Image (cartoon, rainbow, N blue to C red):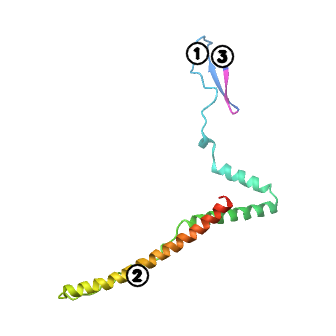
Amino acid sequence: MRVIVYLKLGWGRERGLTETTPSLLASHAPSPYIPPMSFFARFSPVRAIRDLRFFLAQRRPYELVFLMIAMGITGFFIYAFARDDYVPVPYKPNIIYVEQWPADRTDAQIRAQQKIDYVKKKQELAEEQAAKDQRKAEFKKVDDALTKWGF
């Protein structure tokens, strides 16, 4: 007696097993109810392109025009954000000026030059502190206005 058993494997596939004699023991390992899923086994670039062509063939011409415009705008923004990420640093030369002093100058000459340099340095520090204070006053003014508005 010949028995043919059809197993449902899912996705419309069946497998036929043939037994020559019926037996009470299992003749093969049971197959899983759901077959193993594999994304790349069902993916085909040819089918994907064919599906895209079929989809685009059903669209009206104005829909394709708007599709191209939307893709162009999106591409522009992606390019703009990617391009904006890189900002070249401008070249700024680092020039250090050095004064030449005679090797045989006296201590009095050195002290006299230090007094002159001290006055210049004090004036530069005062200008820098005034600029900091002015900037601080500007921020204080903005902070007071925001506090008045409740922020």
Q: Please tell me which of labels 2 and 1 falls first in the chain.
A: 1
Mark 1 to mark 3 CA distance (whole Å): 16 Å
Residue at the spot of label 2: 123
> Left or right: 145 with respect to 100?
right
Q: Residue at x 69, y 33 (%)?
A: 11
Within 10 Å of the Cα at label 3, are there few (<14), some (14-19), or many (20+) other Cα atoms? few
Q: Please, what secondary structure does the residue beneath circle 1 have? A: loop
Mark 2 to mark 1 CA distance (whole Å): 101 Å
At label 3, the amino acid type is: Arg
| Magenta residue span | 5-11
At label 1, the amino acid type is: Ala
Residue at the spot of label 3: 2
The spot of residue 144 in percent (x, y) is 62, 65
Q: Residue at x 19, y 87 (%)?
A: 106
Which of the two marks, 2 or 3, is nearer to us in this view? Answer: 2
Which of the two marks, 1 or 3, is nearer to us in this view? Answer: 1
Q: Please, what secondary structure does the residue beneath circle 2 have? A: helix
Q: Please, what secondary structure does the residue beneath circle 3 have? A: loop
The spot of residue 5 in percent (x, y) is 67, 20
